[in-house]
Image (spheres, rainbow, N blue to C red):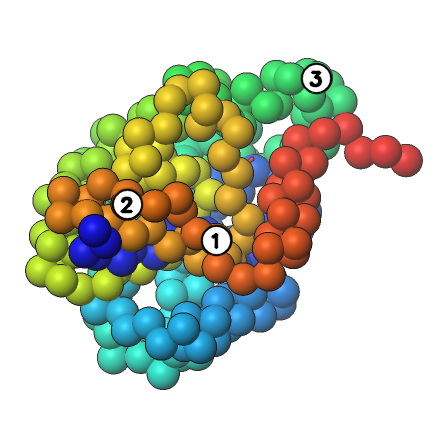
Amino acid sequence: MSKYKLFLLRHGEGAWNKENRFCSWVDQKLSDNGIVEAQECGRLLKEHGYQLGQVFTSILSRSIHTAWLVLEALGQEWVPVTKSWRLNERHYGALIGLNRAEMALNHGEQQVKLWRRSYDITPPPIDDSHPYFDEIYNDRRYMTCDVPKEQLPKSESLKEVLDRLLPYWNEVIVPVIKSGQTVLISGHGNSCRALLKHLEGISETDIVNVTLPTGVPVLLELDEDLRPVKPRQLLGDQAKIQEAIKKVEDQGKVQKK
Ligand SMILES: O=C(OP(=O)(O)O)[C@H](O)COP(=O)(O)O
């Protein structure tokens, strides 16, 4: 029997989703379309009458702004929002900033799919010659984390995302859910995929085929041990959602002229 409701949300479209570049730990803002997606998500949750108890975000602006816009559209701005680097997007290492379609042209679509969707392949690490290294590692937000800056990742597989996310999930988020509050996690494509893998027990092979569109709330109904009692529900117009998933998948393909 369903005891708890949990929403996982990939933030609204960011500027680099639009440009088809690996964004990851670069702090890009929402695009105009991303703002609308977040507001529509809030309106949809309002229509269903959902009442949030707590919201968790990463420390990247696109996930925080999405949470704010959702709460505003819901009329529940007072709901506490808690932030952690442990909900950040997967660290894409040296791939950060690169264009996926150009990479597909240079390395092949299969390699790009492996980098994007496999469970345990870690992309090459970022080093201090990378154009975004200083912007990321000199940012004050990464001096406030629960690990020293030197121990923050320089690249991550999905498995490594789950490894850094799980302690936060177990120690901070689970007690809130078990206290009976409906939680929304405003996260990222791959931080949400990692959590979905854990909660739904998705295999390492099947997780390759899970892709999340931006701005679409994923509802999980959980039993008292936080096991899903039914398949995840992506709320909204199902035809549009399928189209949006395909668009994300196609980002890793060579662009047709
Ligand atoms: O920043 C990213 O994800 P996000 O838009 O969910 O924050 C990644 O670049 C997503 O890339 P992917 O869809 O190739 O895994």
> Seen from this angle, which residue lies furthest bottom?
75
Q: Residue at x 17, y 64 (%)?
A: 181
Compare residues 184 and 124 and report the one nearer the observer.
184
Q: Residue at x 63, y 36 (%)?
A: 249
Residue 219 in view, yes or no: yes
Q: Residues within 10 Å of mark 2 (few under 14, many from 20)?
A: some
Q: Residue at x 38, y 65 (%)?
A: 67
Q: Amino acid at mark 1?
A: Leu
**Ligand 1 lies under 8 Å from the Cβ of mark 1:** no
Compare residues 233 and 85 and report the one nearer the observer.
233
- To which residue does mark 3 refer? 108
Indicate left or right for 6 with 12 as reference: left
The quarter holding residue 90 reads: top left
x and y percent of residue 204 in the render? 40, 20
Residue 229 is tagged as 2
Q: Residues within 10 Å of mark 3 (few under 14, many from 20)?
A: some
- Give the number of the mark in front: 2 or 1: 2
Residue 234 is tagged as 1
How far is the residue under mark 2 from the one under mark 1? Answer: 15 Å
Q: Residue at x 61, y 17 (%)?
A: 111
Residue 5 is tagged as none
Residue 20 in view, yes or no: no
